[in-house]
């Protein structure tokens, strides 16, 4: 028998019958969302599909008429799409890091939240790649990046790390899911034939033998080690795309850690939001406990303070000098056109959450959910501020250009496409939770001190009865 990571204090005091009932209860709770979809769930999915379809229609218009349907011009050649790309890369980073670091350190609270973090990472990085294609005027030339890309180009660096990170994130989600897929294969026999075939195909013949458990856990450990540098590198390389471009506000050696710190903060807030929604919708209060929210709240306080340090470091030095184009940009951010948005992001997305979450009452599920919403919205607008104001303040302004080139406000087509991409991420997470257990059953049971070989073999237990 394989050793257990943690022995629950009450589990061994139960009789064999009570142990079986306990295991069945956890399985039933985890599989309940897969058995039926409530009316609210159907309406939620329908709403996301409608937003996604609107985004698809807007993209059709963009393909038909070209990028002239957007507000992007020679000044603001990067707009809403690139802001959204950076946001998706940011929230994808922490999903993998939270799961991998907590797994490697055997931190017991990680078990119920790992899969939530991992599906956020996978869905976000998928749409990060798609939004870059949307930003291209000629998406049919995407293959040129692979066939004619030059290693000197930071864009090629980003293509490499995004692709590698996507593959690794999918593996990181899939490998620990194998016992859960096998459980669905064996238990959900009332499902349509195509769905049962899907479970059978994806389970890869999982039977829960000691050798299979050993291989799976060893594979998870290897992926955990690999994904940490990959997760950090993807956002660092994204930061280099900006830092290697000669623009005021981007000419910084601080951009790599600055982006990574912001990604940690935004991603943690996204995980908190998902935890609250799944806890409420699927009645997972027993497994996503107040202790989990308390821990994530403390983590968010720490990350807000770290990100505040990098923000001060990023703006203090050029603000002290206030020279040339850098000075004009900072004036626009601090007191000019973008000042309300800039200060709103700093206050509501960083300072206020850090202060509020110092109180334990604010780290309860509902309050921390509301605070995390502010953090995520502010994180999106922070990426918008990283892109747009800087594009409008080049070192060498273009002479005799139309006045509207000096301003940027996205068209409805841009907003519809970005809204569709955000809906797409939420749709992937929602649909995933309707086909696969969103709580890792085997990790939750293992935490109770149950032998691994028995975790996903309900047929054996039924026979034992």
Image: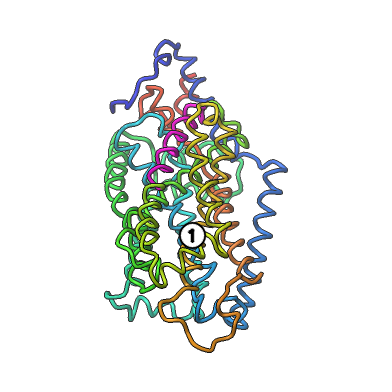
Q: Position of residue 1 (x, y in %)?
A: 28, 26
The answer to which quarter of the image holds residue 422 is bottom right
* Residue at the image point whose x is 65% and y is 58% from the top: 49
Is residue 220 toward the left or the right of residue 266 in the image? left
* Residue at the image point whose x is 66% and y is 51% from the top: 45
Residue 350 appears in the rendering: yes
Residue 177 appears in the rendering: no
Magenta stretch: dominant SS?
helix
The answer to which quarter of the image holds residue 90 is bottom left
- The number of numbered badges drawn on the structure is 1
Nearer to the camera, 195 or 77? 77
Label 1 crowd bin: few (<14), some (14–19), many (20+), radius 10 Å: many
Quick check: is 298 in the magenta stretch? yes
- Region in magenta: 287-307
Nearer to the camera, 386 or 116? 386
Location of residue 11 with respect to 5 vertically, above or below = above
* Residue at the image point whose x is 59% and y is 53% from the top: 427
Nearer to the camera, 322 or 130? 322
Quick check: is 293 in the magenta stretch? yes
Is residue 233 toward the left or the right of residue 170 in the image? left
- Residue under label 1, please give it: 383
Location of residue 78 with respect to 282 vertically, above or below = below
């Amino acid at each position: 028998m394989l050793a257990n990571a943690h022995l629950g204090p009450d589990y061994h005091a139960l009789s064999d019958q009570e142990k079986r009932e306990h295991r069945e209860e956890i399985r039933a709770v985890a599989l309940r969302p897969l058995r039926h979809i409530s009316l609210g769930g159907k309406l939620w999915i329908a709403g996301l599909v409608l937003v996604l379809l609107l985004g698809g229609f807007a993209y059709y218009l963009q393909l038909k008429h070209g990028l002239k349907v957007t507000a992007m011009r020679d000044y603001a050649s990067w707009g809403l799409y690139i802001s959204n790309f950076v946001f998706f890369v940011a929230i994808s980073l922490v999903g993998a890091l939270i799961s991998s670091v907590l797994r490697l350190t055997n931190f017991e609270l990680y078990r119920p939240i790992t899969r939530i973090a991992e599906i956020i990472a996978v869905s976000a990085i998928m749409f990060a790649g798609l939004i870059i294609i949307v930003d291209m005027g000629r998406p049919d030339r995407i293959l040129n990046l692979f066939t004619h890309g030059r290693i000197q180009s930071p864009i090629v660096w980003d293509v490499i790390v995004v692709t590698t990170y996507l593959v690794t994130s999918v593996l990181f989600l899939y490998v620990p899911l194998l016992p859960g897929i096998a459980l669905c294969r064996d238990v959900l026999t009332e499902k349509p034939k195509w769905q049962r075939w899907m479970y059978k195909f994806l389970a890869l013949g999982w039977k829960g033998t000691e050798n299979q458990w050993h291989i799976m856990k060893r594979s998870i450990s290897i992926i955990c080690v690999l994904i940490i540098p990959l997760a950090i590198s993807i956002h660092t390389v994204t930061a280099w795309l900006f830092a290697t471009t000669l623009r005021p506000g981007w000419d910084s050696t601080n951009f790599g850690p600055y982006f990574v710190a912001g990604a940690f903060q935004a991603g943690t807030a996204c995980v908190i939001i998902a935890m609250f929604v799944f806890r409420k919708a699927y009645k997972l209060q027993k497994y996503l406990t107040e202790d989990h929210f308390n821990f994530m709240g403390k983590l968010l306080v720490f990350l807000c303070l770290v990100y505040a340090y990098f923000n001060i470091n990023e703006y203090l030095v050029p603000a002290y000098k206030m020279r040339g184009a850098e000075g004009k940009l900072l004036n626009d951010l601090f007191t000019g056109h973008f000042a309300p948005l800039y200060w709103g992001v700093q206050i509501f997305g960083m300072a206020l959450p850090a202060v509020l979450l110092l109180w334990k009452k604010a780290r309860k599920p509902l309050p921390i959910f509301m605070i995390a919403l502010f953090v995520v919205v502010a994180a999106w607008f922070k990426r918008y501020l990283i892109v747009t104001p800087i594009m409008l303040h080049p070192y060498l302004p273009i002479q005799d250009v139309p006045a509207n080139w000096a301003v940027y406000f996205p068209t409805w087509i841009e907003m519809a496409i970005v809204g569709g991409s955000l809906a797409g991420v939420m749709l992937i997470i929602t649909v995933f939770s309707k086909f696969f257990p969103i709580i890792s059953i085997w990790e939750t049971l293992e935490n109770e001190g149950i032998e691994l070989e028995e975790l996903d073999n309900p047929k054996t237990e039924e026979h034992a009865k």
